[in-house]
Amino acid sequence: MNNVIEAPTIEYGTLAPLLLVFAAAVVGVLVEAFAPRYLRRSIQVPLTLLSLVGAFALVLVTVVGGGVPTEPVAMGALAVDGPALFIWGVILVLSIVCVLLINDEGHFVASAASVPGSADEEEAERAGSAHTEVYPLALFAVGGMLMFPAANDLLTMFVGLEVMSLPLYLLCGLARRRRLLSQEASLKYFLLGAFSSAFFLYGIAMLYGYAGTVSLAGIGQAMTTGAALDPLLLIGFALAGVGLLFKIGAAPFQAWKPDVYQGAPTPITALMASGTLVAAVGALLRVFWVALGNLDWNWRPVIWVIAALTMIVGAVLAITQTDIKRMLAYSSIAHAGFLLVGVMATYSAAEGNAVSLQAILFYLLVYGITTVGAFAVVTLVRDPGGEANHLSRWAGLGKRSPILAGVFAFFLLAFAGIPLTSGFFGKYAVFTAALGSASEAGDSLGGWMTGLVVVGVIASAIAAFFYVRVIVLMFFSEPAADGPAIAIPSAGTVAVIAVSLLVTVGVGLYPEPVLDLAQQAASGLFVR
Amino acid sequence: MSSLWLPILMAVPVLGAIVVALLPKGSDKLAKQVTLLVSLVVLALTLVMAFQFTGAPGDRFKFAATYDWIPSFGVHFGVGVDGIALVLIALSAVLVPIVVLASWHDASGVKAADGTVVAPKRSVKTYFSLLLVLEAMMIGVFAATDIFLFYVFFEAMLIPMYFMIGSYGGAQRSYAAVKFLLYSLFGGLLMLVAVIGLYVVAGKGTFMFPELVGAIQDPVTQKWLFAGFFIAFAIKAPLWPVHTWLPDAAAQAPAGAAVLLVGVLDKVGTYGMLRFCLELFPDAAKAFTMPIIVLAVISIIYGAIVAIGQTDMKRLIAYTSISHFGFIVMGVFAMSQVAQEGAALYMVNHGFATGALFLAAGFLIARRGSPHIADYGGAQKVTPLLAGFFLVAGLAGLSLPGLSSFVSEFMVMIGTYSSPAFGSGALTVAAIVSALAVILAAVYILWMVQRTLNGPTAEPVKAFKDLNAREVWVLAPLVALIIGFGFFPKPLLDVITPAVTSTLSNVQVDNPAIAEKGAGQ
């Protein structure tokens, strides 16, 4: 017996982006504790932005320096491979953009603890106090988002999931206007999120019982030798799957999305709709492709049903929505379904899988950017009582402010996947990957994959209807007499919209550079 | 060797659209003049290019240019024209300046003689820049030799048309615009699946059309992919029973936009059948010929009968077009040289004839503010010039001998009647049944003419002014073309013939069954 405990090796260089974000979050908390109130904001904003930009720069350094690790790091706890680095880059860009939105005045409550409409609240508002805790909370959430898809064992993944989710539960309840709705959203998200976390944790336990390890590669390994139809494995896979599918908002686990997206402050909605979705899809891919890769004849039929259901439910229910944020939430559900089509496009050969992965990574990037842009526009259309989210209030916006309405219409066309927008190529890439796997000899689903693509196409057509409906409202309807005012956008919001628009247009015209980047990231697949 | 002709033809209207969109506020007149100038430049360039075109053997696609666009997907910016594409591009280039002139006041608020608002005032700049964007896409969609590029234009061109109908159309405009967009989008998405399927199954790693001809051999795969393309084109064309969007869209669109919608955009459907459905999937095309011919004949007769019952001029013209598209589809799928040449020629002639008819009707409507036939009567006495043009355009619509549509309709019918493709005589029957439409056409056109132009002059019509110089300039060139090509269609046929020959050879090379049956007759 050797009593010396070996110190774990930690690859600090590789993990630097993650560590930087967490460190900045901790510093942010200290600032909240010690800096005087009037200084906090002017410290927090640069701190948050700089740390995120710095983390993004570190990701670039790793990629450009050719130091993409081919082995898991931190004693096998994290896998900073090509896809993970790509996802990190996407999440960091999206979160920088979202922080610019968060920084805009007037989204967050002055004192979350006071009863809505009470004297306390009025006083806090008069005093001009604001919750600058928002910034460290957002940083923690972003840190969790980085950790979640890079986790190489299920426990780390669970920690990442919780670090990501807990701050978001809180942030959802901080909306300044319509506070009861916001608090309701927060509570709903917390309860359902906790429930799904429990599922995930239970699944982990089952998988551990089956494989004797929580490492993803270890579970995959155990399947090559162990019984494939072990109840522990099947139950574990099902429960862990529920936890992950809940996070991306796949049907039938989508119920939280519209309520939460509607109630949360819009910048936080943007962060959830883009960053959380990207992170969760990354984690889902890792679990299903690495750990359960050998079980694919088991999970693919299940995911087939879920993907089809998600696309249809998202598209159909969006039609009945009258609130712009709820509509975008259902749109996000439909897009999660399209992404699941990509997740299912698995091949027997690694090159084929790399193509599917490239498609998914590309989709995540372009969808995330367009989403943030769309929510940024939503923040600008305001009534005296806050954002004008009811669709009827958007009538005639095209006449009142043609540029803003035009930009929003373009984002909607991108969501609908009209050619010459980035969204078209995302959808195209995913469908191509799926049809490619359908035509592969010996594919376990074969023609069913073609069927799924057809379902996807029908869902796209249905989805086009409600995107187009908003365009009709904005451009072809007469403006309401007391229509909403368009807030003068702050420089940050302008920058957010401009960047989103540029990417959506640019990638729509010439997607090759981004596709190349995604292809390089995907070529090595996930490290095991 | 890359030719810059087609990229330049597409770039000029795009640049023009940007310039028009960026003009300062209040320069509406300048916007119209710039648009007219740009469209005339495009027309001049197209004509110069067309005169350099020869049907000489060698490369099938002339003025070809291919650039890598998205190497990861095997997508090229590939353009080039054969005779069929060339005449359709020329058709677009001719119609656009005419439409610009015709729509001169459409966006600035049209009022009828009695003060009824025909069209409220809207952004003039937006209308004309959309028009130029649409022109670039119309040229692109016919010039594309890369199937992915074709798809991109096929879908993207819906958007400017959608806004032109939705923002500038009549009372039901937003309903019509959404219906138009959703029908086309749905067809387009089915085609997208087929496009991807073609790419994946062919396994060539490219979307270039010439390389994909003959790439799919399996008959079952061919049938599925054919169906994906065909449904999209049938909606676009439109063929019965997926035609219902067209009367709404055409009736609600401003007259100029309706001309481009029916005259050019719908031709993309019939062009796509001829170019892609036949050549890429010859076996499937052969297998599906009979059902498609039946659909075409139903369209021909149904469109004509329903047209007779219309009370709205623009809806009437839209239904006549459904009948005419039936002829074109029948000609395409009759699989004989004469019928296909007739179909290709019909696409052009229908553009001129229906264009003239829509515009003349539009001028009439602009004077009265109502599209209802019953609101007119005796216009001939008050506005002899307008009535004359209207009559000639109408006669072209019923294919009077001596006018251009007669040549093409006759070719389609004779080519179908004597097509060697099927020994069963079914095509002969189809040709005979479709000939009934000639009689029906006389009914719907002459009855409309009689109710609007002849008879006692209705009270509001008495206040009408005859065509002004601008309006004469709109209609005169079209009528000249209709009469000119009616007597002398040779220039068009000269460029179409070799293209049809190579289309048919592509279909038959992979399909000895047709050749055998043909020889056996």
Image: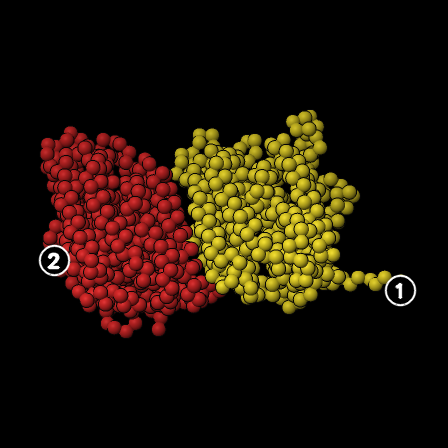
Chain colours: A yellow, B red
User: Residue drawn 30% across and 42% down?
Assistant: B244
Mark 1, secondary structure of its residue: loop
Relative image position of residue B126 (x, y in whole percent): 37, 46
Q: In this view, does A205 lie above or below B461?
A: below
Taking depth in this image into account, of A173 and B46 the one nearest to the observer is A173
User: Residue drawn 48% across and 52% down?
Assistant: A452
In the rendered structure, the answer to whether residue A6 lies left or right of residue A171 reads right
Mark 2, secondary structure of its residue: helix
Which chain hosts label 1? A
In the rendered structure, the answer to whether residue B241 lies left or right of residue A457 reads left
Residue A329: tell me if it is visible: yes
Q: Is residue B5 above or below residue B172?
A: below
Relative image position of residue B185 (x, y in whole percent): 39, 48
Q: Mark 1 points at which residue?
A: A1
In the rendered structure, the answer to whether residue A21 lies left or right of residue A276 reads right
- The quadrant where residue A258 appears: top right
Q: Mark 2 points at which residue?
A: B487
Q: Is residue A255 above or below residue A233?
A: above
Q: How far apart are marks 1 and 2 (CA)?
A: 106 Å
Taking depth in this image into account, of B325 and B403 the one nearest to the observer is B325
Mark 2 residue type: Phe
Mark 1 residue type: Met
- The quadrant where residue A479 appears: top left
Q: How crowded is mark 1: few (under 14 residues within 10 Å), some or many (20 or more)?
A: few
